[in-house]
Every structure is written in structure tokens, then in C-alpha cells.
Amino acid sequence: MIPKLCNIKSYYFVNKTLFQIVRERERERERERERERERERERDRDRDRERERDRERQRETERET
């Protein structure tokens, strides 16, 4: 049996729409992963800065004694 043209068009539209939704969700997940990586990098930088401050304090303390 040959499907009607309108059915083919509607299937195409539905599939295309679903594909767009899935693709947009994948993009959103990727953006979220990137934001999480950026937050992790920022935490690492903060941690490094804090360590450097601690080292400086330690050096200052050693110089004073």
C-alpha cells in the first residue's frame, strides 16, 4: 500500500522536529558540560591562588624570624 503524500509530509515534519529537539538537547548538555568544566577551572585557579598566598605568608613568616 502506498502512503498518502500528506502522511509522508507529516512524518517528515515530525521526524525533522524531533531531530531538532534532540539536537538542541545535546547542544544544551554540551554547554552545561562546558560550564561545569569552566567552574572547575575557576576552582582550580582559586585554589592555586590561595596556595600561592599561603606560600607568601610562610615566606614572610620565615623572613621575620
Image (spheres, rainbow, N blue to C red):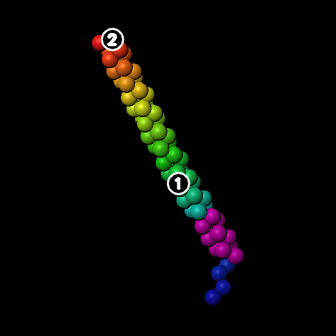
Q: Residue 51's quadrant in the figure?
A: top left
Stretch of the chain drawn in magenta = 5-16
Callout 2: SS: helix
Query: Which residue occupies 47% across, 39% down?
Result: 41
Residue 9's image quarter?
Answer: bottom right
- Look at label 1 and name its amino acid: Arg
Q: Is residue 11 magenta?
A: yes
Residue 39 vs residue 17, the one in the foreground: 39
Q: Which residue is at 54% across, 59% downward?
A: 22
Q: Main secondary structure of the magenta part?
A: helix
Is residue 1 positioned above or below 37 on the image?
A: below
Disc 2 versus disc 1: distance between alpha carbons? Answer: 58 Å
The residue sitting at 35% across, 14% down in the picture is: 63
Mark closest to the chain's N terminus, 2 or 1 = 1
Q: Residue type at mark 2?
A: Glu
- Residue sitting nearer the eye, 55 or 14: 55
Q: Residue tagged by mark 2? A: 64
Q: Residue 55 placed where, x, y %?
A: 37, 24
Q: Secondary structure at mark 1?
A: helix
